[in-house]
Image: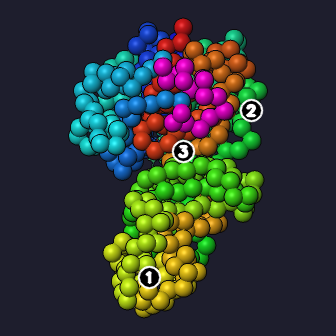
Amino acid sequence: MSKSNAEVVVVGAGAAGLFAAIHAARRGRDVLLLDGAKKIGAKVLVAGGGRCNVTHHAVSEHDYHTGSKPVVRNVLRSFTVDDTIEFFEREGVSLKRERTGKLFPTTDRARTVLDALLQAAVQSGVRLEHPRRVLGVGPSDGGFVLQTESDPVRAKRVILATGGRALPKSGSDGLGYTIAESFGHTTTDRIFPALVPLVLPGGHPFRDVPGIALPAILTVVARSGKHLAQTKGDLLLTHFGISGPAALDISHAWRDAFEDDHEVHILANLYPSQTVEQTDASIQKSGGRPVRAWLRDHFPERLCVAILNLSGVSGETPCAQLSKPQRVAIRSCMHEAPLRFEDDRGWHHAEVTMGGIPLSEIRWQNMSSRKADGLFLCGEILDVDGRIGGFNFQWAWASGYLAGCSD
Ligand SMILES: Cc1cc2nc3c(=O)[nH]c(=O)nc-3n(C[C@H](O)[C@H](O)[C@H](O)COP(=O)(O)OP(=O)(O)OC[C@H]3O[C@@H](n4cnc5c(N)ncnc54)[C@H](O)[C@@H]3O)c2cc1C
């Protein structure tokens, strides 16, 4: 092979592409890994708040949104969490399991994970070139020709691991979809940001209390009143709306429903450790205490003010003098605050992509394209997005492994 040609060209050196390249090279293939980014591994480095949540101790297809759970199950079973732990252990990265079930490097540094991947790539003979963006891929002499920012590259096989559209400044801007489409692939009707914060309208009292974090249950509710999805976890109130694990996890379901009906909303239970009945009884037992003082037993002062604003009740009103509608208003704001969002925060703040290339267009056994011989796809470019907790990287490792190991 001439220097700028290769048996296998992997496009995209993110988690999936690095894994595919390493495993293809370990099987003796001549592998060229191209990435358009100046700095490799941006998403690995920012992941998990800079600690990189590499995987989760228990992963199944039910942790993902996708058009085909059976395919996700098969891929995950082909390269399991134990395989991930063993891979990194062999590369000198020990993982530790936290109380939440998430696995992080014992160093608590994402850099350790990225360095191990890059070292494994170099040691297995992968040639990594960046920044070298692939602008298009076409068929050529029973193989492929890739147009790049410099000379064209010829390859017998191409593994497309260009990611989705989340965090475009990292290099994943959706061009991979266009390349796949040029071979007859399609994309799902909906491609939206997921694991993304949600934006409340200006003037909403919760926007005035940024920085407050609390456990919550969030429920997506349709116009008809039907509960569409629910998640439980830590919620962070911000200057624009909501963030934190609970908000990010519910964002996929909210956005999907919002596309069909802008009347969809989220009910926020901000005090899930107590039932509505217990809250009601507690207010009624509090006699002459001002409702604001009673609220302070449950929430930080600033949030008490926001709840009073939302409910329209004066904080000085003694609990015993609250009318029934006022009591209901207070407890509703605590247990089912209706939040109507304007939008999500967009691609620049999203962790993953909802939608992508349908799994029906690949053979899961080796992630090969059903549209073009010699083309393989792995990682976030496909229609798979996981919840918070290391599930998205596990998908990248497993699908990248299969694409790299293909005969
Ligand atoms: C802030 C943040 C935190 C996250 N934290 C976690 C976490 O802790 N745990 C977890 O499991 N998941 C996390 N994720 C999600 C996880 O990072 C992704 O699911 C995963 O990185 C997807 O891997 P990928 O290789 O498919 O795509 P990407 O990581 O997006 O990599 C694609 C690569 O392809 C390159 N590329 C794109 N187009 C071209 C082209 N035309 N030519 C050449 N190169 C190209 C890009 O430069 C990029 O390097 C996080 C994401 C973000 C944004």
Quadrant in which the C terminus is drawn: top right
Q: Which residues are magenta?
A: 62-77
Kindly report the secondary structure that dominates the magenta region of the rendered protein.
Answer: helix
Splitting the image into 4 quarters, where does residue 365 fall? top right
Badge 2 amino acid: Thr
Q: Mark 3 or 2 closer to N-term?
A: 2
Residue 2 location (% of width, % of height):
52, 15
From the image, tell me which residue sits under label 1: 305
SS for dot 3: strand
Number of the label disc, if any, that sits on residue 186: 2
Neighbor class of circle 1 (other Cα within 10 Å; few <14, some 14-19, many 20+) is many
Give the residue drawn at x 62%, y 35%.
Answer: 66
Is residue 46 visible to the viewer in this orientation of the structure? yes
Which residue is denoted by mark 3 in the rendering?
352
Where does residue 11 sit, x and y in percent of width and height? 55, 29
Q: Earlier in the sequence, mark 1 or mark 2?
A: 2
Horizontal side of residue 315 vs 289, given as left or right: right
Q: Name which residue lies at 61% across and 55% down.
A: 220
